[in-house]
Amino acid sequence: MQVFIHIGTHKTGTTSLQACLRTWSPELAASGLLVPSAGTLSATSGHHNLAFQLAGDSRYDPALGGLSELVAELRLASNLPHPRRAVISSEDFCCLVEKPDGLHRLESTLRREGHTVTWVMFLRRADDYSESLYTTLWGCGVRPRFGYPGFVLSILAKGKYAQTQRFGGSVHYFDFAAFTRRWRQLSASRLLLRDYDQAVATQGVLTCFLSILGAPEALIATASCDQPRLNSRMEHITRRYRRVLRPLLMARFQRRHRRVING
């Protein structure tokens, strides 16, 4: 079975995309595309519990299922007449670039079962991404030293932002050239990259993703007309710094970003 694994990044419409996948799972299954329930947190969430398990995150809840349960669900689906492909999604999968044991465990387990893995990732321009991510982290109680300017300066210096262990220890890359280079060193499977901003400006992220999956044309048409936006935030707390910090982020990362997308 072809297994698509959507790995983010954060702040690229993932919550809305995951809610649609779960809500439309019966229609997708009828067309040959399985959306497993193992490893999800709720009826409309992505497979975050599976990502927590693979990353060794304390938020992992065995009662919600993990890798073993996912494998069992895929085995069952393989014996049914319809499903030929499957998709799992969590923006926290991209953090496995810093947890290679978890990445290897997921990929090797699926490949041993006879599945083919394709990673799918949407990349967002650094200035918008920084504001959106900072606002989300702030809402979760994360307080970077020196506020948003300190947050951006850390990203400019390191190409990524690492949360403390208190908040899961996740690492958020802004240097996507470095991310993709490391990911491809760790994984033998295909990494498919898409430009988030271009998708938003044209067909929409959900429509773009469903097209990658080979979803039915009727469902893609529905998605193009009705794309809910969940978990949206207004970046009021970063507004005063935009004139200075946004050009710095774009100068540091945008050329490399375009090279990765076009390469």
Image (cartoon, grey):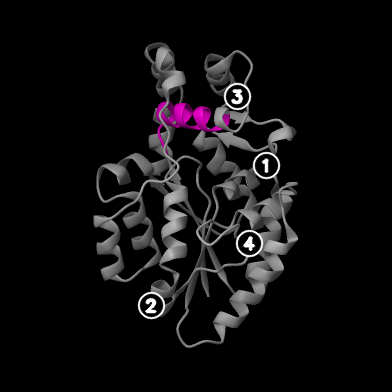
Q: Mark 2, mark 3: which one is toward the viewer?
A: 2
Residue in the image at 53% along x and 20% along y: 152
Indicate the position of residue 100 as horizontal and vertical percent values.
Answer: 70, 49
For the residue labelled by badge 1, is the local secondary structure a helix, a strand or a loop?
helix
In this rendering, the answer to whether 104 lies above or below 75 is: above
Residue in the image at 70% along x and 36% along y: 169
Residue 39: numbered disc: 4
Q: In this view, does 163 lie to the left or right of 232?
A: right
- Give the mark, 1 or 3, whose residue is nearer the N terminus: 1
Q: Mark 4, mark 2: which one is toward the viewer?
A: 4
Residue 19 lies within the magenta run? no
Question: How many residues crowd around disc 3 within 10 Å: few (fewer than 14), some, or many (20 or more)?
Answer: few
Quadrant in the rendering for residue 215: bottom left
Q: Mark 2, mark 1: which one is toward the viewer?
A: 2
Looking at the picture, which amino acid does disc 1 mark?
Glu
Q: Can residue 257 be seen in this view?
A: yes
Q: Can residue 113 be seen in this view?
A: no
Looking at the picture, which amino acid does disc 2 mark?
Ser
Looking at the picture, which amino acid does disc 4 mark?
Gly
In this rendering, the answer to whether 100 lies above or below 171 is: below
Residue assigned mark 2: 31
Residue 158: numbered disc: 3
Residue assigned mark 1: 98
Q: Real-space Cα distance between discs 4 and 2? A: 22 Å
Magenta range is 124-137
